[in-house]
Image: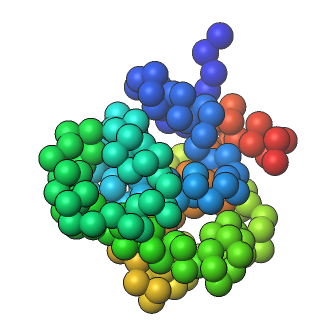
């Protein structure tokens, strides 16, 4: 039986991501860091390009162990820039290391990145009721606020549009269309 999806029908990788991850609330700091970095890596590209390289990112960046990443040196950066398993953009690679350091600072200040990020929406996912992609914003006042705060702390590749995509990915926002089978499932599960 075919399930109605708002997106993700083009290939198995997208379908699995849509059906199992996108919009599901995430509270694990390592996974939050992974999505923050992957959404930043997507800047100027499409999500399928990043999904295809996700395992490469996990391999290259120590499974998104932000404590290890924060310690990367120039030698490691040079190695990363030679690895076809990731997007070999120097600014994006360097920002991953910088963002790991700031991520640790945020953890120290708030106890966890999870507490920091979910506090922006009072720990309750936003359930939008979109019927088409025209109903889904590219950014919101909340993503503007988060982006501004992360930039003030020194993070890179955290513009408001990237942060809104991050919010969608980690389930801070349920932007599945109401006709999509995942919309109600996510509400029921969380």
Q: Residue at x 49, y 61 (%)?
A: 66
Q: Position of residue 109 (x, y in %)?
A: 65, 84
Task: Work out which residue is located at the far top of the displayed protein and give it.
Answer: 1
Instruction: Find residue 178 and report its horizontal and vertical position in percent.
Output: 68, 42
Name the residue located 46 percent from the left edge and 31 percent from the top edge.
Answer: 14
Task: Name the residue nearer the viewer: 91 or 79.
Answer: 79
Q: Quadrant of residue 53?
A: top left
Nearer to me, 131 or 111: 111
Q: How many marks?
A: 0
Colour scheme in use: rainbow
**x, y (%) of residue 179?**
66, 36
Closest to the observer, 81 or 20: 81
Q: Is residue 56 above or below residue 154?
A: above
179 versus 103 height, above or below: above
What's the residue at 17%, 57% (across, down)? 78
Classify 147 as above or below 174.
below
Q: Quadrant of the N terminus?
A: top right
Q: Is residue 63 left or right of residue 128?
A: left
| Residue at the extreme right | 188
**Along the line of sight, the residue nearer the viewer: 68 or 23:** 68
Q: Residue at x 46, y 22 (%)?
A: 12
Task: Decide if residue 157 is in sight here.
Answer: no
Asked if residue 53 is positioned above or below residue 26 in the image, the reply reads: above
Residue 23 visible, this orientation:
yes
Percent position of residue 74, x then y: 21, 66
């Amino acid at each position: 039986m075919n399930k109605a999806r708002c997106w993700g029908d083009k290939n198995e990788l997208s379908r699995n991501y849509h059906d199992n991850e996108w919009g599901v609330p995430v509270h694990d700091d390592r996974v939050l860091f992974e999505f923050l970095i992957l959404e930043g890596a997507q800047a100027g590209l499409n999500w399928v390009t990043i999904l295809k390289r996700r395992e490469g990112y996990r391999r290259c960046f120590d499974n998104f162990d932000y404590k290890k990443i924060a310690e990367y040196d120039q030698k490691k950066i040079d190695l990363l820039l030679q690895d076809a398993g990731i997007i070999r953009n120097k600014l994006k690679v360097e920002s991953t290391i910088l963002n790991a350091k700031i991520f640790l600072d945020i953890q120290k200040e708030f106890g966890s990145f999870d507490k920091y990020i979910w506090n922006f929406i009072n720990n309750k996912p936003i359930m939008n009721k979109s019927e088409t992609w025209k109903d889904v914003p590219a950014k919101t006042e909340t993503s503007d606020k988060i982006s501004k705060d992360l930039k003030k702390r020194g993070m890179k590749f955290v513009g408001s549009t990237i942060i809104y995509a991050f919010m969608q990915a980690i389930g801070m926002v349920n932007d599945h269309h109401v006709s999509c089978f995942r919309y109600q499932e996510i509400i029921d599960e969380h």
